[in-house]
Image (tube, helix red, strand yellow):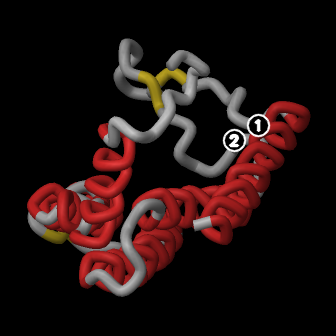
Amino acid sequence: MTRLMAVLLALCSILLGLLLAAVVAGAGRAAALPHPTHAPMLVGVDAGELGAPAWAAYVAGVVMLGTMWVTMLIGFRQGHWIHRAVNAWMVGYVLLFVILMWSFGAYAAGRTMIVLGFTAPTSLLVYGLTLAPWIPLLAITWKFENAYFGPREQARFDEILAESKDPRRPARDGRA
């Protein structure tokens, strides 16, 4: 648990460092431009002119995924099947993120295809990265009590309750 908290602190520090660097560099201050044909419409800033290099977005994405990974593991009993399942699921999720970043590069280069009604990057977002977290979320919800608070923890809790109800034991607040 302490190791996971240290990893979480490191990941949050990296994310905060990236955020501060972006603020200092003025990243993200690009504005949309009027569409050349349809004046009321605006053309977005999806051409990468956001004032930050693309690698910074990739690093921020991986750090955010790492933060999500570590926070899901905190509190799980070591060796419980959900602990292993979250690790396996997150490896797949990180790979899906890498594929998404690759597909954005292909889209920017004009090499994309339509997948389930959207361009490949959009389909990965809609059907992949958006829906994928529901599977571990449902598994964790289903087995929450046993994964976080198992029989060993219940026995220790019962022991603490029994000690607190022992009439021979003096009260902790100093009253007799």
Q: Please state, as top left, top right, bottom left or bottom right, where the N terminus lies in the image.
A: bottom right
Give the answer, above or below, for where 170 lies relative to 18. Answer: above
Please say whether residue 53 is visible from this viewpoint: yes
Q: Residue 86 appears in which quarter of the rendering?
A: bottom left
Which of disc 2 and disc 1 is earlier in sequence?
1
- The percent coordinates of residue 41 (x first, y second) are 37, 21
Residue at 69%, 34% in the rendered image: 28
Image position of 98 (left or right of 112): right
Secondary element under disc 2, as helix, strand or loop, is loop
Residue at 56%, 56% in the rendered image: 64
Amino acid on which the number 1 mark rests in the picture: Ala
> Is disc 1 in contact with disc 2, using a CB cutoff of under 8 Å?
yes
- The percent coordinates of residue 148 (x first, y second) are 30, 62
Residue at 67%, 71% in the rendered image: 3
Q: Residue 159 appears in which quarter of the rendering?
A: bottom left
Q: Which residue is disc 2 drawn over?
A: 50
Amino acid on which the number 2 mark rests in the picture: Leu
Give the answer, above or below, for where 173 lies relative to 122. Answer: above
Badge 1, how many Cα within 10 Å: few under 14, some, many 20+? some
Q: Which residue is disc 1 drawn over?
A: 27
Secondary element under disc 1, as helix, strand or loop, is loop
Pick the front one: 8 or 125: 8
Pick the front one: 11 or 71: 71
